[in-house]
Each structure stands twice: as C-alpha cells, then as structure tokens.
C-alpha cells in the first residue's frame, strides 16, 4: 500500500499525492491531483489499488532523459484512428517511460505527415498534449524540480536527438 505524501500515478489523472485514507463507507485512498493551477481531491477505492503505481524514481528519470535518443517510438498502427487513439491513451495510464514514448511517437508522426505535405491526424495533437503533460509532471516529481525545469530537460534531450522540442 502507499504512504501519505507518496506520489503515485492515477490512471485517469496522472500524478497524484496520497493525502490520507478513509474507512467509511468503504476503504478509500484520498489523493490530490494537480492539473494546471487547480488542485482536485479524489477518493480511490482500496479494492482497486492494483491500478495505481508509484512514480518513477530519480535514477530512472535521469536515465530516461539521458537515453531519450535511444527510446523507440511505438510502432502500433490501426486502420481506424479511433482505435489507435484508444491504444495510445491506455499507454498513458502506465506512466513513464510510456508517456515519454507516446509523446515521442506522436511528435514523430506529426513531423512525418507534415514532411509529406499531409495534414496530421487530429488525434496526434490531443494525445501528444496529454502525453507531454503527464511526462512533465512525473519527471518533475521524480527529479524534485519545477515542471518548467523538467520540460526544459526533455526539450534539450529532444533537440540533442535531432527532434523538434515540442509541437503544440
């Protein structure tokens, strides 16, 4: 089980902090999620605790950033873009390194489409935005830095790998 103050990955919210526990009417973990400037309190059933997992640690975060160039894009493709989008959204629930892999994949797909003078699928930008948010939040927690500093580290790694630092 988790401890108060521990940062965990919630499948729908991303990074959350455990703030307490409640027993009534059913056992719950009380979480605080921060999305942008707002803070949200959530109650998560202890019976589903296996869907939550801790954030990566500092060493894993440093290794992930330093090996960004070697991080493979996800090769998954599907004829139906809705099914493809669902697949990548499920990957985001796993936390880093998968969130960074999805961001890199979407960035690459957008770049490749534009290089062929094609309009990228609209879901690429949606998934990229969420993948970047989740990656930045988790790396900021793991490295104990601001989200701006975590984003700068990711962008620097992307530039060093010869990729575009970000696509909005």
Image (tube, rainbow, N blue to C red):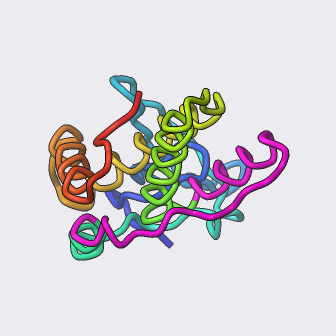
Compared with 141, 80 (above or below) is above
Compare residues 61 and 158 and report the one nearer the observer.
158
In the picture, measured across the screen, residue 155 lies left or right of residue 4, that is left
- Residue 26 part of the magenta-drawn span: no
Compared with 109, 141 (above or below) is below
Give the residue displayed 36% in from the left and 68% down from the top. Answer: 56
In the picture, measured across the screen, residue 27 lies left or right of residue 155, that is right
- Residue 82 part of the magenta-drawn span: yes
Q: Residue furthest top?
A: 37
Give the residue displayed 43% in from the left and 67% down from the top. Answer: 54
In the picture, measured across the screen, residue 47 lies left or right of residue 155, that is right
Residue 123: name its quadrant: top right
Compare residues 58 and 151 and report the one nearer the observer.
151
- Place of residue 5 in the rendered image (x, y in percent of width and height, measured from the top left): 32, 57
Quadrant location, the C terminus: top left
Compare residues 141 and 119 and report the one nearer the observer.
119
Total marks shown come to 0
- Place of residue 60 in the rendered image (x, y in percent of width and height, measured from the top left): 29, 74
Residue 152: name its quadrant: top left
Compare residues 92 and 17 and report the one nearer the observer.
92
Q: Residue furthest right?
A: 80
- Place of residue 153 in the rendered image (x, y in percent of width and height, measured from the top left): 18, 51
Where does the magenta region start and end?
65-93
Residue 6: name its quadrant: bottom left
Compared with 165, 96 (above or below) is below
Give the residue displayed 84% in from the left and 49% down from the top. Answer: 79
Give the residue displayed 42% in from the left and 54% down from the top. Answer: 18
């Amino acid at each position: 089980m988790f401890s108060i103050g521990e940062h965990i990955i919630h499948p729908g919210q991303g990074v959350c902090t455990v703030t307490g526990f409640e027993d009534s009417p059913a056992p719950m973990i009380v979480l605080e999620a921060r999305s942008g400037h707002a803070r949200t309190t959530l109650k998560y059933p202890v019976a589903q605790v296996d869907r939550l997992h801790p954030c990566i640690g500092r060493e894993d975060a440093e290794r992930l950033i330093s090996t960004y160039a070697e991080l493979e894009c996800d090769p998954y493709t599907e004829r139906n873009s809705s099914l493809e989008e669902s697949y990548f959204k499920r990957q985001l629930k796993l936390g880093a390194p998968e969130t960074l892999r999805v961001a890199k994949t979407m960035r690459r797909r957008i770049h490749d489409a534009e290089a062929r003078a094609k309009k990228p699928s609209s879901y690429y930008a949606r998934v990229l935005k969420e993948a970047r948010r989740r990656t930045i939040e988790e790396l900021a927690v793991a490295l104990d830095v601001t989200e701006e500093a975590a984003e700068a580290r990711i962008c620097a790694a992307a530039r060093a790998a010869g990729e575009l630092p970000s696509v909005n």
